[in-house]
Amino acid sequence: MSRKTMPTSRRRVLAGATASLLAAPAIVRAQAKALKLAVFLPRSGYLAPAGQSCHRGALIAPRVLADFGYQVELVHVDIESNPDVARTQCERVINDGINAIVGAFDSASTLAMAQVCEQRQVPLVVNIAAAPQLTEQGYKFLARNFPTGGQLVTNGLKLIQDLLDATKVAPKTAVFLHANDTFGTAQRQAMDKIFPTAGLPFRLLESISYDPKAQDLSVEVTKIRALNPELVLVVTRAADAIKLVRDMVRQHFEPMGIVSPGSPGLYDEEFYQALGPFSDYPIYNIPWVNPKAKLLQALEAAYKPANPNFRFAVECFNVGFTFEALLIAADGFKRAGTTTGPELMKAIRATGIAEHVMIGPPIKFDEKGQNVSIPSAVVQNRNRTPTVVLPASAATMTPVLPMPGWQGRT
Amino acid sequence: MTWSIYLNVVIQGVFTGLVYGLMALGLSVIFGVVRVVNFAHGEFAVVAMYVAFLLFRALGLDPLVTMLPIAALFFIVGFALQATLINSFVGRPEHDQFILLVGIAIIVLNGLLVLFGPDARPANLPYAFDSYAIGPVFIDKVRIYSAVAALAIASGLFAFFRYTATGTAIRACADNLTGAAVVGLNVKRLYAITFGIGLACVGAAGALMVTIADAAPSLGPAYTLLAFIIVIVGGLGSMAGALVGGLLIGVSEALSGFLIEPSMKSMFSFALLIAVLVLRPRGLMGRRA
């Protein structure tokens, strides 16, 4: 039997070399030793305080992850609190060969990124973003380790009842004030749906939306003052929380309490610095870190020398969730052994991380890519530090409600 | 709901509107005379906010005290900018002027981001949380002080243009450029003085704004847009129109925010703008072309 051999021609060698060159990125991607991750955060613009806080967590993460056997390389992207920037930067980093994306604190920006990641089959691990549609639109390349707006509000309202029971106060009326961005609107929708059946003893007089970029909230506070509620339920974003309390003090408006059923703003370092003694006593019901977790202790040990001007106790929420998102991606890569999008995403969706930094059971995702078991805690500002006050098993102080008046605070 | 709540809202709107008006006054003065639209207006206001913020943080100087030195500094900057850069663009196509000033705005904005970062910087004045209680009406101290200062500066500016030789010469340039040149006025120098005055208004307004709002680079484009709305409503080139426009925007935003929905208050500024453009394109106090 004769065997035909193909003659080696110059043209054939050239074609082979070209094919090798074209295939090289895919080969490199599949065999990479470290996972290349882009971390998308709003490090400038109106969400900058929280974005910067998350960024500080991302900066220390590779070292901590390396100590636990995970190899990641990070590319940091500032989305400028702007969904359009998030979308275009997402396209750019994927074209540059990124393996997966983590982000982006802001629901609107994360939604914009999710569409791009879905088209390009690149995994997106959400660190913080609560808009329900992220996991309700059937995205296959998205995993969210953060509660949805509905989960936040459900947990938050249940904890308000626990708070009222613990403090033995019975407010009769409340006003709900919320930012009018994607997150705030999602929270409003959740409140409209869940509050009527939550069985809370107070009546919701009105829901008021405001622009979180407004330079002051004097009109908003005057409007609330005219309604004279005992409780003010708030969904703030960042610096708007400062403006809210500042205008309440200026207008001598002293509700029984300022309570967030789950939102940022009231625990940013800026909030404490700008308001001083007036920053104490607002309450927010949000997921919090587990001080007993080994990984949290390692994270805190890395955070402190890297950020001497910031307090881990204040930043642990943003740092914790950002770190966990990176951990999920790195863990998926370790199990998948490849950076190819579909396989990496399959491994991420099959996550089962028992040892992590936030309070709650092992990190797992449902068929929609949502972690449905993230509990909340009642956290109150005390001595200008976020302090867990409920549940009693995790509390380091007892809750104070009604909050002391503005006058006489030092 | 009592009358006192409405009164409170209107007073807040009036006081905020006066500071807005002072900021827009600079834009109106520059356009009225030099016929160049300063697209970097808001960015310069934010620079002034940072200068006032730094002086307060470093030396403990109240922005109400540093307002005049900052205005003087901005006059020099404006004079130099007009004399060295913008004069050569006067008379050139509008898109050339637009690109120049937008370029300046981008440089200023990014310079602020590099120097100060994106975070908002509150001045935290000792009286920032204080207010006067007149019966059931509460008026913030910072708003009263800022509004009074804005009114004083605007009055000074009106007096300057009305009663001084330089002011009269500048008005002559605005009314009849050829005639002013024929009678021997140094038009380029007067343009530089005018641009300096415009930026001095911005400097003073920025120093006052830092008592009301936290300094942040992202405010720049928002203030530019706000100043445009005000001067178009009031009448481009009209000094009194800028103040009236500021008051209208301040009060309409406050009232619409209170009566309808706070998140929709900016919409009413734009609605007012559209109404003025349709019904009275030259603005409420603008002169017929």
Image: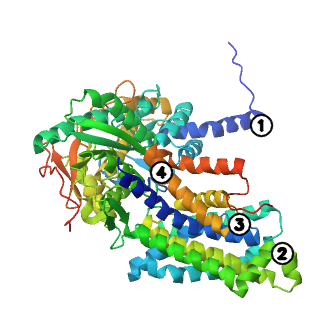
Closer to us: B73 or B168? B168
Position of B130 with respect to B166 (left or right) is left
Closer to us: A112 or B97? B97
State the residue at coordinates (16%, 42%): A163
Q: Determine the secondary structure under disc 2.
A: helix
Q: Determine the secondary structure under disc 3.
A: loop
Residue bearing the label numbered 3: B237
Of all residues, the one furthest to the right in this rendering is B182
Q: Amino acid at mark 2?
A: Leu
For residue A96, above or below residue B22: above
Q: Amino acid at mark 3?
A: Gly
Q: First in sequence: mark 2 or mark 4?
A: 2
Closer to us: A176 or A146? A176
Residue bearing the label numbered 4: B255
What colour scheme has been applied to the protein in the rendered image?
Answer: rainbow
Q: Are marks 2 and 4 in contact (CB under 8 Å)?
A: no
Residue bearing the label numbered 1: A10
CA distance separating discs 4 and 3: 27 Å
Residue bearing the label numbered 2: B177
CA distance separating discs 2 and 1: 76 Å
Q: Are marks 3 and 1 in contact (CB under 8 Å)?
A: no
Q: Are marks 2 and 1 in contact (CB under 8 Å)?
A: no
Count neighbours of disc 4 (C-alpha within 10 A) and say few if under 14, some if 14 to 19, many if 20 or more.
many
For residue A248, above or below residue A132: below
Count neighbours of disc 2 (C-alpha within 10 A) and say few if under 14, some if 14 to 19, many if 20 or more.
some
Q: Amino acid at mark 4?
A: Leu
CA distance separating discs 3 and 1: 75 Å
User: Quarter of the image holding residue B28?
Assistant: bottom right
